Amino acid sequence: MTTPTNVYFVDGVRTPFGRAGEKGMYHNTRADDLAVKAIAGLMARNPDVPAERIDEVIIAATSQQGDQGLTLGRTAALLAGLPESVPGFAIDRMCAGAMTSVTTASGGIGIGAYDFALAGGVEHMGRHPFGTVVDPNPRLAAEGLVSPEALNMGATAERIHDRFPELTKERADRFAMHSQHKTHAAYQAGKIQPDLVPVAVTDSEGAMSLAVEDEGRRPETTMEGLAGLRTPFRPHGKVTAGTSSPLTDGATISLLAGSRAVEEFGLAPKMRLVSFAFAGVDPEIMGIGPIPSTEKALRKAGLTIDDIGLFELNEAFAIQVLSLLDHFSIEDDDPRVNPWGGAIAMGHPLAATGVRLMTQLAAQFAERPDVQYGLTAMCVGLGQGGSVIWENPHYYGRRN
């Protein structure tokens, strides 16, 4: 008989994120190999966890085709050297793929069906550009369920600017600039690198090198430079490449465990899952999705926004984060929000990003014993939001 248990985030790693396309460092690297490298790196730094005790491997991908197809959780597990007895599967919730991998695995752990699970995601946007092989049902548009424009994420970001004129382009530019600068400072302080798994890559001429850091960072970003960028999603619009996450390749993976496994192997978890929630919104302004999902997660946890001491919010677009901050009366430059920068600087390989948010929050928890709760949240295409609330095991006020 299974017994309900707490769910713990034991560890998480990711590959460095690369620019998508021919000039990107992963142009000649398979998507599944990125996932394999992440799994191997995670298991190597957790030698006390027997591979045969992993009960499930869940890998998300938005474009499940080619080298991102064939039930990634199972194939990546086999390629990474996990025993044949370890099962796995693939999952999709667009940008919240890895987040959904974690919450799905957490459900299995929470009811006692799993002791350990690996959960993460991969996206090779250079090989599989978003939306290129999908065939949306014509009823979605014909019946007014989803506007064709809602399938263009940049267009949905412009619509948030329309809906909330107080969220100005200048505010978005400033937020994006600070993201670049904070990420650069975090790299300079060595805060990002410990959770990166190096990847051997080969360029178009066959020369080999090692990918060890995120490729798309622009620490030289200024307000003047951002002000002069074109608005590709609408003539005379407000959303630019500088206030958007770049097209990116990369993979993430986390190790989750229940109380029984943590005790059996003497593990030191980095976070405890408190609650999670997903919510739907109008697809044409999908970027506001994290607002209702965060409200729902807070309600389920019996908490308020004031209880959250650290926020890791996905920067799909600057405007998306600003909409959540305004809703909860949080200042644009609040030091609790994305203290090491975010996707505008590091990149957003769609289905992989959720675990990057968690890994960074976990590392910040270790530095901040004064913080009890943190939030990871993100918007999702077709009008959804996802939020997960975590507790800091290092919190000095925590009850035993």
Image (cartoon, rainbow, N blue to C red):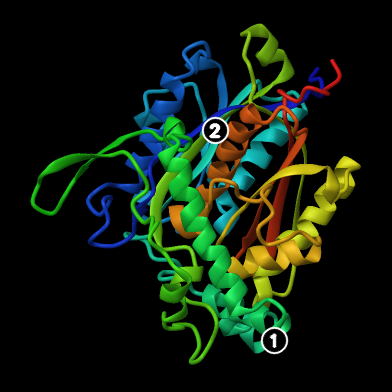
Label 2 sits on what residue type?
Ser
Query: How many numbered discs sit on the rendered protein?
Result: 2
User: 121 and 225: which one is in front?
Assistant: 225
User: 30 and 239: which one is in front?
Assistant: 239
* Residue holding disc 1: 143
Which numbered tag is attached to residue 86?
none
* 205 sits to left or right of 262: left
Q: Residue at x 38, y 43 (%)?
A: 16
Quadrant of the rendered image containing residue 367: top right
Q: Residue at x 55, y 82 (%)?
A: 238
Q: Residue at x 76, y 29 (%)?
A: 110
Which numbered tag is attached to residue 254?
2
Label 1 and label 2: CA atoms lie apart by: 40 Å
User: 314 and 63: which one is in front?
Assistant: 314
Q: Secondary structure at mark 1?
A: loop
Q: Residue at x 64, y 61 (%)?
A: 379
Extreme-right residue of the structure: 302
Query: Picture coordinates of residue 43 (x, y %)?
Result: 45, 22
- Viewer-side label of 1, 2: 2
Query: Picture coordinates of residue 273 (x, y %)?
Result: 73, 33
User: 103 and 320: which one is in front?
Assistant: 320
Query: Picture coordinates of residue 203 (x, y %)?
Result: 16, 50
Query: Picture coordinates of residue 314 (x, y %)?
Result: 59, 55
Q: Secondary structure at mark 2?
A: strand
Q: Is residue 384 above or below residue 150?
A: above
